[in-house]
Amino acid sequence: MHFQFNVASPATANASDTVTTHSAVVPPDMTDILRQILETQREQLQFMRTSAASHDASGRWRAFLDRWKDDFGGLPTACKRALPHLERAYMTLIADLAAHLEDQGDDGIGNDFALSEFLDRYGIRLNQLGTILSLVGPLAEIAGTTEPKKQQG
């Protein structure tokens, strides 16, 4: 099979209908469209910045601490010191949970009584420690970003 393609040369615009910008020929309505696109992109950028700021949890924690800095100024540093202990307790509990399930095998949570005992033993403590970590963690991170850096002598 043979195909033949005929390509016509592009139509040239009339010189009176165009605007010359940096040696490029742009139709007048095109500059309007480009201006509108630029304005829309600026609005989208502003929206994205606002959205990112509203989702910034550390920014909210910083604002919260700034309101109470006279009463609780040392709280971020205290949280930073406490965080490793809480993390260790949390991981120890998870390791105990995994070892318990491994020792019990399929009978570990296979019936209602075993499941209830398992949840009583691990569920509440694991949930509470997780909640505490989710509250102390951001405060500890703030301490890392607000502490003055030590100068090397």
Image (spheres, rainbow, N blue to C red):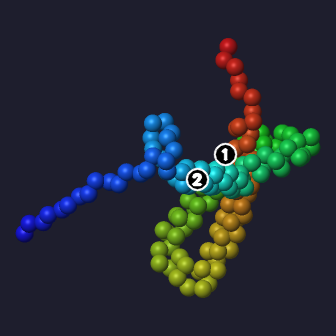
Q: Is residue 20 above or below residue 100?
A: above
Badge 1 is on which residue? 84
Left or right: residue 69 compared with residue 139: right
Left or right: residue 105 compared with residue 90: left
> Quarter-wise, where is residue 142 in the image?
top right
Name the residue nearer the viewer: 78 or 105: 78
Circle 2: residue type: Asp
Badge 2 is on which residue? 32
Crowd class of label 1 (few under 14; some 14 to 19; many from 20; radius 10 Å): few
Q: Is residue 128 above or below residue 57?
A: below
**Which structural element holds mark 2?**
helix
State whether residue 147 appears in this view: yes
Q: Is residue 110 above or below residue 123?
A: below
Disc 2 to disc 1, C-alpha distance: 58 Å
Question: In which quadrant will I find the N terminus?
Answer: bottom left
Crowd class of label 2 (few under 14; some 14 to 19; many from 20; radius 10 Å): few
The residue at 56%/59% (across/down) is 95
